[in-house]
Amino acid sequence: MENKVLATVAGKEIKESDLKNIISRYPEDKRAYFTTDEAKKQLLEQIVSFELINILGRELKINETEEYADNVKQAEKDILTQLTLNKILLDVTVTEEDALNYYNNNKNLFTQPPTVSAKHILVDNKELCDQIKKEIDNNEITFEEAAVKYSTCPSKEQGGNLGSFGRGMMVPEFEEAAFGLDIDVVSDPVQTQFGYHLIKVEEKNEGSEAEFEDVKSKIVNQLLQEGQQRKYLDVVKELENKYGVTRA
């Protein structure tokens, strides 16, 4: 396969293989960005710029300074540390069986709890609440119009819309009424610490449990990270005992 020369900087060729090598160093989730010609062109321009700056650095003899030597030493140390760490963590693996066991033992983490989507009208006395419900039941006004007209809750501007919510997010009396209502049925007045409510549920989600296959990769990644963290801490502790560490 032809290894096309993409640019030449001061006699040095930059080839397609150089571009591919640089892209391969990016995290996997970032590599997709470089699938377009425009993105590759931007990366090539960056490589050209770096080559030119590198040449300038040598002309200025920065590579002969003490600062340069110190940075090289630190870079070598960092590279050695990272490569050693990669080797240490290489044997940390997570099997599908490990992931399945975690899933079965922690199913509560993979369930979507029941929710309702509701609107409400809030007033400060039962008599007015009864009157509003009567107007709605007699089709004299829609629920949303009544919310705008009568409700003291800021949600009135959205026709009383509270959006979707689960258990534990509303006061108990309101929650009990909302989850017990059929869809599009206007409740009787519900008293809470805030006043009297009329509630209309527009949608119900009974909750669901995620299938193992849908969350397997997420579980594997989580267990892998946890395993690597444990391995890292164990090795560091072992090395401390072997070589000795004193702290101020």
Image: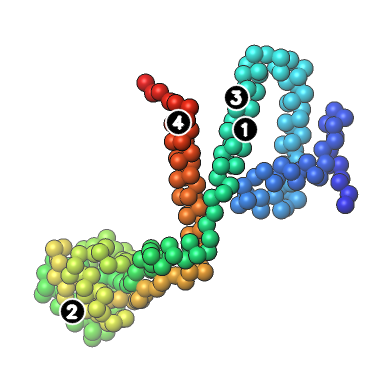
Residue hosting label 4: 240
Q: Earlier in the sequence, mark 2 or mark 3?
A: 3
At label 3, which amino acid type do we have?
Answer: Gln
Q: Quadrant of residue 177?
A: bottom left
Q: Residue at x 29, y 71 (%)?
A: 119
Crowd rating for badge 3 (residues with CA inside 10 Å; few <14, some 14–19, many 20+): few
Is residue 196 in view?
Answer: no
Q: Quadrant of residue 76?
A: top right
Q: Earlier in the sequence, mark 2 or mark 1?
A: 1
Q: Earlier in the sequence, mark 4 or mark 1?
A: 1
At label 1, which amino acid type do we have?
Answer: Ile
Which one is closest to the eye, mark 4 or mark 1? Answer: 4
Q: Quadrant of residue 247?
A: top left
Q: Residue at x 31, y 81 (%)?
A: 183
Residue hosting label 1: 79
Q: Which mark is residue 74?
A: 3
103 with respect to 40 (left or right): left
Contact between marks 4 and 1 (CB within 8 A): the answer is no
Q: Earlier in the sequence, mark 4 or mark 3?
A: 3
Which of 241 and 122 lies nearest the eye of the viewer? 241
Residue hosting label 2: 188
Considering the numbered disc 3 on the image, is that residue within a helix, a strand or a loop?
helix
Crowd rating for badge 2 (residues with CA inside 10 Å; few <14, some 14–19, many 20+): some
Which one is closest to the eye, mark 2 or mark 4? Answer: 4
CA–CA distance between discs 2 and 3?
Answer: 73 Å
Q: Position of residue 233 (x, y in %)?
A: 45, 40
- Position of 93 relative to 247 (above/below): below
- Position of 90 relative to 219 (above/below): above
Considering the numbered disc 2 on the image, is that residue within a helix, a strand or a loop?
loop
